[in-house]
Image (cartoon, grey):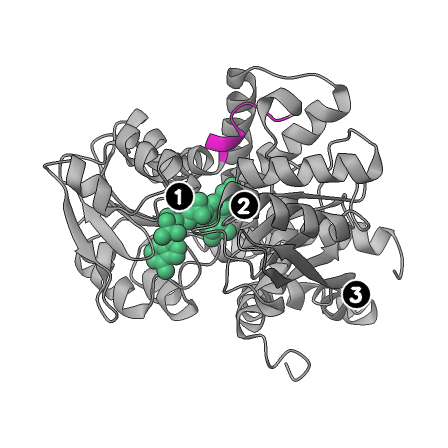
């Protein structure tokens, strides 16, 4: 704790993981202690920090900080997204990289854990400025990554446009056309269904969870936060499964639309115009727009059966959890990474809410990225249905594995523990087999 005192998000993630691994750690105490498993798994293989200079449209040189944390490659090349957001710092990237180890392990595919990004804010920048930043960022990052070494992907602020600019720069510097990034465009090695994968995967897992408890998702009301990549496709798949999503949010406000969110309109506002949700409300008579106000529950105050937090970390706190329970919510499945605080998670679990954390619930994105890597290695492209079918199978297997792991260690129904244990066991087995490294 002392070594990482200035990294609260990292400490929060490690605390959550280690607490929930307790039954597994207790059962293997001597073996883990002798091999310093916990000390090794909480220390990244390496942390790379670098200067990213670029020139803005006024001819002014700007300087951002770039990060890549290569956390653990026991079961495959490092894999994890690149976050571009002013809030990015080493602690946030470390927390995301740490969680990624277990998430990637859960996908059943051979990928290790890493994460990266920059405190660069893509909002309001011209395409040329975005390209200048991405090229500078990749000029340095290209020294540390490769198709069999470390394969970054998108995350908040890094979409298809940014991945394209970065891929182009990698290719230019290294002279090699290889699957070094995922989330690529379809004309240059991207996978069909990657855009939809995290949101769709979240719903495949939520559906499997509810089915296992004898609940039909059709006819249920969902409350969703976020209005980005994850939220949009979660809403789309929920609607395809017969549920109705009545909310979404962005960083300045949120929408309540009792008729059900119009996905095409939301896509137009967020993906094409890159505008605020006020534009959604302006074009949709049934929608109410609410400004975001500190201390208010926002979307979590809306009555619904299924909560899908899909925006950002720590967006659902204890008071929000109380509002959800009071409104009779059945399940909370996380589309975002760590959107629910530790106290809120505990409260939801203690009050009978079915809760699956992001590590398992949003693993569909990285799983499909790994499928993109497979297609790149094969130099083949699979059809949308082929990828989507594999994604569905993977999410159902993840649910079965986390449910089974929780049962094996006597914490049945605790899917947070189940996910951590199932992900951890595989990585530790590989680490032990590979000796002290
Ligand atoms: P995007 O950048 O596409 O979207 C994020 C959305 O959340 C935006 O609409 C943003 O608003 C909104 N948002 C950000 N902060 C807040 C806030 N404090 N309150 C309310 N809304 C907020 O990101 P993604 O959808 O890709 O990612 C969302 C989450 O899912 C992240 O935690 C990410 O790490 C995680 N994730 C993403 C995966 C993927 O494949 N995309 C895979 C696995 C996890 P605004 O429009 O104003 O910026």
**Magenta residue span:** 190-197
Disc 2 element: loop
Instruction: Tell which tag, 3 or 1, sits nearer the viewer.
Output: 1
Of 320 and 296, which appears nearest the observer?
Answer: 296
Instruction: Tell which tag, 2 or 1, sits nearer the viewer.
Output: 2
Q: Which residue is mark 2?
A: 158
Label 2 Cα crowd, 10 Å radius (few <14 / some 14-19 / many 20+): many
Q: Which residue is mark 1?
A: 228
Of 333 and 51, which appears nearest the observer?
Answer: 51
Is ligand 1 less than 8 Å from the beta carbon at label 1? yes
Disc 1 element: loop
Q: Position of residue 388 (x, y in %)?
A: 51, 23
Of 309 and 241, which appears nearest the observer?
Answer: 309
| Sequence-wise first label, 3 or 1 | 3
Circles 3 and 1, Cβ within 8 Å, touching? The answer is no
Q: Is residue 145 left or right of residue 164?
A: right
Q: Is residue 164 above or below residue 98?
A: above
Q: Is residue 430 left or right of residue 191?
A: right
Residue appearing at x 55%, y 66% in the figure: 13
Q: Which residue is mark 3?
A: 31
Circles 2 and 1, Cβ within 8 Å, touching? The answer is no
Instruction: Tell which tag, 3 or 2, sits nearer the viewer.
Output: 2
Whether residue 216 is visible, yes or no, is no
- The outermost residue toward the bottom is 2
Q: Is residue 291 above or below residue 187?
A: below
| Sequence-wise first label, 3 or 2 | 3
Q: Position of residue 160 (x, y in %)?
A: 54, 35
Q: Is residue 333 above or below residue 376?
A: below
């Amino acid at each position: 704790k002392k070594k990482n005192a200035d990294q609260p998000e990292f400490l929060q993630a490690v605390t959550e993981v280690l607490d929930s691994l307790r039954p597994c750690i207790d059962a293997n105490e001597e073996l883990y202690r002798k091999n310093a498993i916990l000390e090794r798994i909480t220390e990244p293989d390496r942390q790379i920090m670098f200067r990213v200079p670029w020139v803005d449209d006024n001819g002014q040189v700007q300087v951002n900080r770039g990060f890549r944390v290569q956390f653990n490659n026991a079961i495959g090349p490092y894999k994890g997204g690149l976050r571009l957001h002013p809030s990015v710092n080493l602690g946030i990237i470390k927390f995301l990289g740490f969680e990624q180890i277990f998430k990637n392990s859960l996908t059943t595919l051979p990928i290790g854990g890493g994460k990266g990004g920059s405190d660069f804010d893509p909002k309001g920048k011209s395409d040329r400025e975005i390209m200048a930043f991405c090229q500078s960022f990749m000029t340095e990052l290209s020294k540390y990554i490769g198709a069999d070494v470390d394969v970054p992907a998108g995350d908040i602020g890094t979409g298809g446009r940014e991945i394209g600019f970065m891929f182009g720069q990698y290719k230019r510097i290294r002279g090699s056309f290889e699957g070094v990034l995922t989330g690529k465009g379809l004309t240059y090695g991207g996978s069909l269904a990657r855009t939809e994968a995290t949101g769709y995967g979240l719903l495949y897992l939520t559906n499997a969870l509810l089915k296992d408890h004898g609940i039909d998702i059709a006819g249920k009301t969902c409350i969703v936060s976020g209005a980005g990549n994850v939220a949009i496709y979660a809403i789309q798949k929920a609607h395809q499964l017969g549920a109705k999503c009545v909310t979404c949010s962005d960083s300045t406000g949120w929408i309540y639309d009792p008729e059900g969110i119009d996905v095409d309109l939301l896509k137009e506002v967020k993906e094409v115009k890159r505008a605020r949700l006020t534009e959604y409300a302006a074009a949709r008579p049934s929608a109410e727009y609410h400004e975001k106000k500190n201390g208010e529950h926002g979307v979590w105050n809306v009555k619904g059966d299924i909560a899908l937090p899909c925006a950002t970390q720590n967006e659902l706190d204890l008071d929000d959890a109380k509002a959800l329970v009071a409104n009779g919510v059945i399940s909370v499945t996380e589309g975002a990474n760590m959107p629910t605080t530790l106290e809120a998670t505990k409260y939801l679990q203690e009050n009978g809410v079915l809760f699956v954390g992001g590590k398992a619930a949003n693993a569909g994105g990285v799983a499909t990225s790994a499928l993109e890597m497979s297609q790149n290695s094969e130099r083949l492209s699979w059809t949308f249905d082929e990828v989507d079918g594999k994604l569905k199978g993977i999410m159902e297997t993840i649910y079965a594995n986390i449910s089974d792991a929780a049962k094996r260690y006597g914490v049945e129904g605790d899917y947070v523990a189940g996910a951590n244990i199932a992900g951890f066991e595989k990585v530790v087995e590989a680490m032990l087999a590979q000796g002290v490294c």
